[in-house]
Each structure stands twice: as structure tokens, then as C-alpha cells.
Image: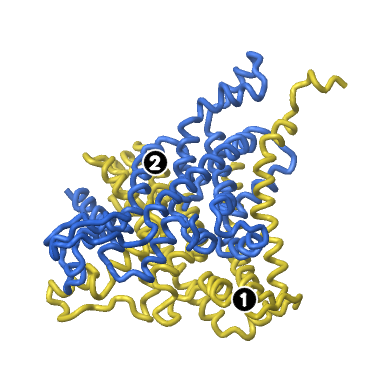
């Protein structure tokens, strides 16, 4: 067979271009994950100097002996639910506004996208400054308006997680808004005109014309926000540091504490695998949704 | 009319937190600690920025020259830019051909690779960082810029391949067919026809990668904080825990926002023009 003269087949050409990607994904994603499974089955602990195979001992401890696990799971669920609601409401609001035709729309788009461009750390800092009792704008405003005689503490053990959800949504909602906007712009103008002549009011037009078109992006935003919120670590580390007390210890923050503050790598890995299973099941739903649209 | 009211509300929502930090960053030390806080600086000064960036500055209240704040903010800004730029370049070089292949060619078992790409994106960063840290320790990669860049690729490569795949799939296939019929090989088609056509999409992906990695905190905090490779985000965070001067802190934080805001303004042009906002293809944060 004259191999040299023949041009490359699809498979050879494709593999040549995919090889670097496969190399990196295996080295940087697959291998560390395998390593992590192994660690989760050991009592690897740098501070105690242990590294022995203990089977499912860590998982048993998480489910039956760790009083913080159920608590952390509860905080994670509350945070995720709040983040999803605020994100969708805010994202939809911004998208509907930016979809209107008015002067200065380009500028408004830029302003709307601005919070998204900032790092999670910067968002945490901005919100710490806003809510600080001493230098915070909210505290100062309350005093200038005569609502309070002295500095006001906004972050308490009871509501700190709500503030984190608000900061999270401030940062992420513009992304959802641009998803919605991309979807809104393909709705044919005729449909609205027709609905108007049929005597449908603004609310009915939204329900029967806009919403059906948005269904797909709503689902995607819902899943994305759920994924991101359930795994958010940086914002909690830098905004509240898990506090006040342990009121903002989510599951991911608990993994961080166990691993990088207690150096219980084995136990931290087991926790992170439980988290991963929860998140991956959401991811599988996401993939099914995506492939279904690709096919149809 | 109602639209402009909404615009004002949206503007306030997006800009007030930013304004507040800027406000504090232009105050001298005593004013920054005034309670209740001033809504604008009564005696505005730029000295906090100079001191945060490692220069001396004149204090108009005491009449003294004050020394630098003594934190590696400038070094952090440079490290962040170099790290993010390197990651962006390497990611684009690997992800563009891979994205093209996945968008255009029929390959056996392609779906497994696609599922792997989406799967890695859904992994919690905190779950990846634990094994990374242990493996990195044994390879001597902890605390080095190269180590950080390599580990960032674990985030950007799967994600950007996915985004670029969506982008290439949205391009018309006819031009490529024409080029093939005219006698171009696959390589020639890719390099002379497809890539020139896709420059805008590839640029957008590069910008996005740069922005994400410039802003990355968790990996940098665990892998390089406190070393000469330290990037700006963890340096600012460690300042927060140690430094007393709020006004300097605010100024240092403002300097960390300059590049992301500029990149965002450039990126904003692409975000709507390109199919990059196709909800399927973008899984950004």
C-alpha cells in the first residue's frame, strides 16, 4: 500500500489534532481523579502522618458519625436554592430590559455585564465593604436616614448565607441575562404583533409568546447556576470565611477546611467524592438536555 | 420612561458596590475610618494607589512623605497577567484544532470524549485541587508559575474546546467543501480557510480564557500563595488578613479590577456578535 501518497483519513487527521487535548485531559483531569478515589479510601493525614488503606471507613464516618455533614448539606441546599431564584429573576429582568430598543442600550449592556467580569474575590471584597458595620455604605445610609443611631451589623449567623447568595447572584446573573438575551432576540417580532391584534395584554404576551421561547435557556441557566452554586468555595472563603461561627459552612467549604486546614486528605477526598456524585448527577441531566437538542 | 427608570435601577445595582470601594480608596486614613462613613471623599487623594503599588507618597494631612505599603501588589499584577496570557495562548493553540475536529469530523467513540469534556466541567474545583496538591508536591510543581499554568489548563482546555466546538459548528461548511474540491488538503483547508474565517471566535475564546484565569482565586491560593509566583487575587486576600489600613486595601483592590474591566469591555463586543453565547456552547464562569 502506497502510504505516503495517500492523504490522511478522517480518523488519522482527527486523532492528530485531538492528541494534545486527550493527553492533557487524561493527565490533568482523569489521573488526579483516580488518585483522589484512592486517597478517599485511605486515612491519609499529613498532620498525623498516617497513610493506610481503610476501605470505605471515611464514607462511613461522613454518613454516620460526622455531625457537620448534614448541617453543611443543609446550608448548601439553602444557598443553592436562593442563588437559583435570585439569578433567574434578575437575569430575566436584565434580559427583558436589554431586549428593548432605546438610546444608550450599548452602554447599558456594558454596565450590566460589568459585575460578571470581576473575580469572585473582588465580589467578596465589594460586598464586605458594602455590609461592614463601620465603613459600609448600608450601615452609613441607615445612619444618615435616621434608621439607626449607631453602626448596623448586617451579617449575622442567621442570615450570612443569604448575603453570600446575593453576592453570588450579583456576580453571575449577567451571564444568565446574556443567555436569555440571545434567546429573546430570535423571537419573531410578528408573533408579538399578532398577539397584540388578538388583544393579548403584556402579561399574556410574556406567558404565551416569550416564555415558550425561553424554556430551553431557562433550563440551562437553572442547571448551570445549580452546579456553580453547589460548588462555590472562593466566595465563602473570602466573604464570610465560613462564619459567623460555622453558619456559612457549605459542603465545599467543609472539604476545604478538612483538607487544607486539618490536612485530613483522605477524609477530605471522601467528602469531595460525595459532593462530586451529587454534582455529577446534575451534570448528567445537563448533558442529556444538550444532546437532545443537538439531535433534534 | 419606565425603561429609563429600569436603566437607572440596573446602573445603581451594578455600579454602587464598585463606587463604594473607589470612594474608600481615595480617602486618607482618618477619613476612611470615620463613622458614619462619608459618601464621597472630602479630601480626595491618589496616595493610596501609589503606596499600594510600592511607591512613596505625600500625605496632605500630616505633611509627611509616607513609604510604600510593603505588599507585592505590583508583582502580583504582573504575575497574574503573565500566567493568564500563557494559559490563554496555549489553550487556544490546543483547543482550536480539537474543537474543529469535534465539530466537523465523524470519529469513532467521539461521544465518550464529549461526555468527558462536559464531565470535567461539572467537577467541583475543590475536588480537583486536593489530588493536584498531593501530586504537585511530589513533582515539585507547588509554588511555581509553570505548575500553576499547567494546572489551570485542567479548567480551560475542556471548557474552551467545548465552546470552540460550538463556534466551528455554527460556521457554514460550504467554504471548506469548496476548498477541498479545489484541491486543498485537510491541513491547508484548516490553516488557510478555516482559521482565518474564525479569527473573531478564537480571539473571543482567548479573551475569555485570559479573563477567567486572571480572576482565578482558589488554585492560586492553594498552589502559589506566599511564593514569588503569587498572583494578584491571593495576594490581595492575604493582605486583607494582615493589613490594618483599609484605604490602602481598597486602592490595592481597585488596581486588581482594571484589567478585567478593560477585557470585559472588549469582550462585550464579541459576546453578542458571535454564536458564542449559544447557551449550549458556553459554560463560563
Residue at numbered disc 1: A264
Residue depicted at 17% across the width and 61% down the height: B59
Q: Name the residue under label 2.
A: B267
Left or right: B73 with respect to A153?
right
**Camera-side residue: B50 or B43?**
B50
Q: How far apart are marks 2 and 1 (CA)?
A: 42 Å
Depth check, front residue: B160 or A257: A257
Residue located at (65% from left, 82% from top)? A61
| Residue drawn at 42 percent across, 54 percent down | B76
The image shows a total of numbered marks equal to 2
Furthest residue to the top? Answer: B182
Q: Where is residue A162 in the image (x, y as percent from the top left)?
A: 37, 72
Residue A58 shows in this picture: yes
Indicate the secondary structure of the residue bearing disc 2: helix
Q: Position of residue A263 (x, y in %)?
A: 59, 75
Q: Which chain carries label 2?
A: B
- Do the residues indicated by labels 2 and 1 lie within the same chain of the protein? no
Frontmost residue, A77 versus A56: A56
Count neighbours of disc 2 (C-alpha within 10 A) and say few if under 14, some if 14 to 19, many if 20 or more: many
Can you say whether A290 is above or below A72 in the image? above
Q: Where is residue A288 in the image (x, y as percent from the top left)?
A: 61, 52
Q: Which chain is blue?
A: B
* Above-or-below relation of A294 to A79: above
Picture quadrant where residue B121 is located = bottom right
Identify the subunit bearing mark 1.
A
Q: Which chain is yellow?
A: A
Residue farthest to the right, as pictured? A1
Please name the residue shown 48% across and 30% down the image: B199
Q: Up-down: is B189 above or below A165?
A: above
Occupied quadrant, residue A120:
bottom left
Mark 1 neighbour class, 10 Å CA radius: few under 14, some 14 to 19, many 20 or more: many
Identify the coloring.
by chain
Amino acid at each position: 500500500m502506497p502510504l505516503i501518497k495517500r492523504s490522511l483519513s478522517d480518523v488519522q487527521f482527527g486523532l492528530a489534532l485531538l492528541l494534545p487535548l486527550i493527553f492533557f485531559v487524561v493527565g490533568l483531569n482523569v489521573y488526579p481523579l483516580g488518585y483522589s478515589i484512592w486517597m478517599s479510601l485511605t486515612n491519609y493525614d499529613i498532620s498525623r502522618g498516617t497513610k493506610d488503606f481503610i476501605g470505605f471507613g471515611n464514607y462511613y464516618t461522613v454518613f454516620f458519625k460526622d455531625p457537620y455533614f448534614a448541617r453543611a448539606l443543609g446550608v448548601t441546599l439553602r444557598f443553592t436554592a436562593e442563588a437559583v431564584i435570585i439569578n433567574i429573576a434578575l437575569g430575566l429582568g436584565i434580559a427583558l430590559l436589554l431586549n428593548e430598543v432605546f438610546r444608550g442600550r450599548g452602554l447599558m449592556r456594558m454596565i450590566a455585564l460589568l459585575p460578571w467580569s470581576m473575580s469572585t474575590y473582588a465580589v467578596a471584597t465589594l460586598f464586605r465593604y458594602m455590609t461592614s458595620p463601620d465603613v459600609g455604605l448600608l450601615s452609613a445610609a441607615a445612619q444618615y436616614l435616621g434608621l439607626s443611631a449607631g453602626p448596623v451589623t448586617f451579617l449575622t449567623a442567621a442570615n450570612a448565607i443569604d448575603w453570600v447568595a446575593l453576592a453570588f447572584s450579583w456576580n453571575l446573573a449577567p451571564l444568565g441575562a446574556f443567555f436569555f438575551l440571545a434567546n429573546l432576540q430570535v423571537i419573531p417580532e410578528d408573533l408579538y404583533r399578532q398577539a397584540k391584534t388578538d388583544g393579548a395584554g403584556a402579561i399574556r404576551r410574556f406567558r404565551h409568546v416569550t416564555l415558550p421561547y425561553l424554556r430551553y435557556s431557562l433550563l440551562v441557566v437553572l442547571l448551570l447556576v445549580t452546579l456553580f452554586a453547589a460548588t462555590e468555595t472562593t466566595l465563602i472563603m473570602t466573604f464570610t470565611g465560613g462564619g459567623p461561627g460555622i453558619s456559612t459552612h457549605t459542603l465545599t467549604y467543609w472539604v476545604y477546611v478538612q483538607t487544607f486546614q486539618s490536612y485530613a486528605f483522605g477524609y477530605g477526598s471522601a467528602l469531595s467524592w460525595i459532593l462530586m456524585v451529587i454534582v455529577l448527577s446534575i451534570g448528567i441531566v445537563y448533558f442529556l438536555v444538550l444532546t437532545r437538542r443537538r439531535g433534534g | 420612561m419606565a425603561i429609563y427608570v429600569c436603566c437607572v435601577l440596573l446602573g445603581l445595582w451594578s455600579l454602587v458596590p464598585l463606587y463604594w470601594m473607589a470612594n474608600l480608596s481615595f480617602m486618607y486614613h482618618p477619613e476612611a475610618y470615620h463613622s458614619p462613613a462619608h459618601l464621597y471623599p472630602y479630601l480626595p487623594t491618589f496616595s493610596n494607589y501609589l503606596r499600594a503599588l510600592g511607591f512613596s507618597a505625600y500625605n496632605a494631612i500630616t505633611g509627611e512623605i509616607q513609604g510604600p505599603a510593603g505588599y507585592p501588589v505590583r508583582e502580583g499584577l504582573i504575575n497574574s497577567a503573565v500566567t493568564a496570557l500563557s494559559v490563554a495562548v496555549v489553550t487556544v493553540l490546543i483547543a482550536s484544532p480539537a474543537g474543529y475536529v469535534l465539530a466537523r469530523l465523524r470519529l469513532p467513540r467521539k461521544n465518550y470524549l464529549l461526555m468527558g469534556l462536559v464531565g470535567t466541567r461539572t467537577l467541583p474545583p475543590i475536588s480537583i485541587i486536593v489530588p493536584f496538591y498531593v501530586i504537585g508536591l511530589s513533582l515539585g510543581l507547588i509554588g511555581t508559575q509553570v505548575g500553576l499554568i499547567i494546572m489551570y489548563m485542567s479548567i480551560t482546555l475542556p471548557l474552551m474546546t467545548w465552546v470552540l466546538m460550538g463556534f466551528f459548528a455554527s460556521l457554514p461548511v460550504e467554504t471548506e467543501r469548496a476548498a477541498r474540491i479545489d484541491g486543498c488538503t485537510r491541513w491547508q483547508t484548516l490553516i488557510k480557510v478555516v482559521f482565518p474565517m474564525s479569527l473573531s471566535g478564537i480571539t473571543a475564546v482567548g479573551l475569555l480564557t485570559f479573563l477567567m484565569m486572571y480572576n482565578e482565586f482558589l488554585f492560586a491560593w492553594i498552589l502559589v500563595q506566599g511564593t514569588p509566583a503569587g498572583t494578584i487575587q491571593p495576594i490581595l486576600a492575604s493582605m486583607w488578613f494582615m493589613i490594618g489600613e483599609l484605604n490602602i486595601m481598597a486602592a490595592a483592590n481597585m488596581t486588581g479590577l482594571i484589567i478585567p474591566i478593560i477585557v470585559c469591555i472588549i469582550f462585550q463586543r464579541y459576546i453578542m456578535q458571535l454564536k458564542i453565547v449559544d447557551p449550549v456552547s458556553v459554560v463560563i464562569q
